[in-house]
Amino acid sequence: MLQRLMNDSRQGDKNMKPLVRMALLGMLIGLLLIPSMTFSQELKIRQAKPNETGMKAWCPIMDYNFDVKATTSVIDYKGKSFYFCCEGCPAEFKKEPDKYLAQTEFRDRRPTPEEIGKEAKCTVMNHRFKITTNTPIIDYHGKSFYFCCEGCPAEFKQNPGKYIVQ
């Protein structure tokens, strides 16, 4: 009797394996499709809205500041709007959007050993000074911005467009 139960159990095991495999395969396909559908939805190109026209923008591809026009291409991605200076830039952005998203974040840091002792210009106060180990630096839009004191980075973060020059 015990032998028969064990045989029946093994037979049931054989019948269940294909079903389990099919279910796992279906779940895997679903997991792979959902992000790609979301990804393509997030990268739709639109034209600038009337309230965006005339504002200052930064093209993450060309690292270029410009005035938004009615014909400016825009991609809204992960809660941020990206403006492009020409028609070719949106396609480049679509290849690695997270790379460009990271460039829009403020990254506070201290100087590297190579930067210490060099001369810099304070982004806010616009005067020259020597970089020390305590010099505040913000990496933003793929560039490093240097500050003469601890108060300047906060001023910069309130309105970075005011201090970024083409």
Image (cartoon, rainbow, N blue to C red):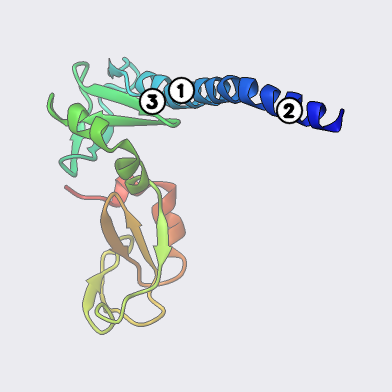
Q: Secondary structure at mark 1?
A: helix
Earlier sequence position, callout 1 versus callout 2: 2
Tell me, for residue 85, which label it has, or none: none
Question: Image point 63% across, 20% down: which residue?
Answer: 15
Q: Neighbour class for label 1 at 10 Å: few (<14), some, many (≥20)?
A: few
Say what amino acid the circle numbered 3 marks: Phe
Measured Cα–Cα span from mark 3 to mark 2? 49 Å
Q: Look at mark 3 in the image and give the residue it sits on.
A: 39
Q: Quadrant of residue 104?
A: top left
Say what amino acid the circle numbered 1 marks: Ile
Measured Cα–Cα span from mark 3 to mark 1? 16 Å
Earlier sequence position, callout 3 versus callout 2: 2
Question: Image point 38% across, 82% down: which residue?
Answer: 133
Question: Image point 42% across, 52% down: which residue?
Answer: 157
The answer to which of 164 and 10 lies nearer the viewer is 10
In front: mark 3 or mark 1?
1
Q: How far across and down, in percent of the image, does residue 76 sit?
A: 37, 25
Q: Neighbour class for label 3 at 10 Å: few (<14), some, many (≥20)?
A: few
Measured Cα–Cα span from mark 1 to mark 2? 34 Å
Q: Is residue 107 left or right of residue 166?
A: right
Q: Look at mark 2 in the image and give the residue it sits on.
A: 7
Q: Neighbour class for label 2 at 10 Å: few (<14), some, many (≥20)?
A: few
The answer to which of 41 and 64 lies nearer the viewer is 41
Q: Look at mark 1 in the image and give the residue it sits on.
A: 29
Q: How far across and down, in percent of the image, does residue 61 sit?
A: 19, 39
